[in-house]
Image (tube, grey):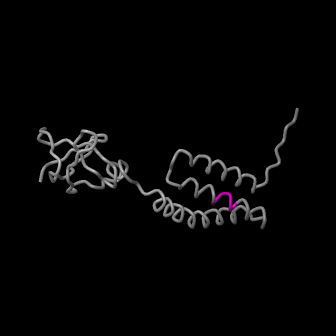
Amino acid sequence: MNITFDLDAWHVWLILGMALVIAEVIGTEFILLALGAAALVTGLLTALFQLALNGQFIAAATVAVLFVPAFFRFYRRRFKATGTQAVIGEGLYRDTELIIEEYGGRSGIRIQGDFFPAKSTEGDPLRSGELVRVLEMHGLTAVVERI
């Protein structure tokens, strides 16, 4: 039994592009999606213009250089971190002065509309209305010091 595959270069680019787009599911901030889209465009250009290998690489590099920053900018604008991600992931609100409030029987702070339980560095209970500074986050709990 003799099995042969007749793949043109544009087939390879399309397969690579689809694989990268699917791999984006792991969450790489649209970079794999941009590279996948660049590979798909390169496959389309190769099919339309019968590009030689060096032309394919130049096309892939050119499209990738255009797509990666554009997709990354889109990602940053569209999916800006909020809540816990903003506090923990991007280090926002560290050393920020906030007011303690009560919510659901717990004392805490509110950041961008999200409530975070708070505990003081001294270990004593916090009272509603106190001004505090966020030092760090332990999970969802803000460690604060009174000002």
Q: Nearer the viewer, residue 131 or 73?
A: 131
User: What secondary structure prevails in the magenta region?
Assistant: helix
Horizontal side of 34 relative to 53 (left or right) equals: left
Q: Nearer the viewer, residue 23 or 82?
A: 82
Q: Residue at x 31, y 40 (%)?
A: 139
Tell me the magenta residue range. 38-42
Q: Residue at x 72, y 52 (%)?
A: 12
Q: Residue at x 54, y 61 (%)?
A: 71
Horizontal side of 144 relative to 75 (left or right) equals: left
Q: Quadrant location of residue 123?
A: top left
Q: Nearer the viewer, residue 119 or 60?
A: 119
Percent position of residue 10, x then y: 75, 57
Quarter of the picture holding the N terminus:
top right
Horizontal side of 20 relative to 46 (left or right) equals: left
Number of disc labels: 0
Compared to residue 20, the image places residue 68 above or below, namely below
Percent position of residue 29, x then y: 49, 53
Q: Residue at x 57, y 67 (%)?
A: 66
Quarter of the picture holding the C terminus:
bottom left
Percent position of residue 4, x then y: 84, 41
Would residue 40 be counted in the magenta stretch? Answer: yes
Q: Quadrant location of residue 33?
A: bottom right
Q: Quadrant location of residue 118?
A: top left
Q: Nearer the viewer, residue 95 or 57?
A: 95
Extreme residue in the right direction: 1
Percent position of residue 127, x then y: 15, 45
Would residue 18 be counted in the magenta stretch? Answer: no
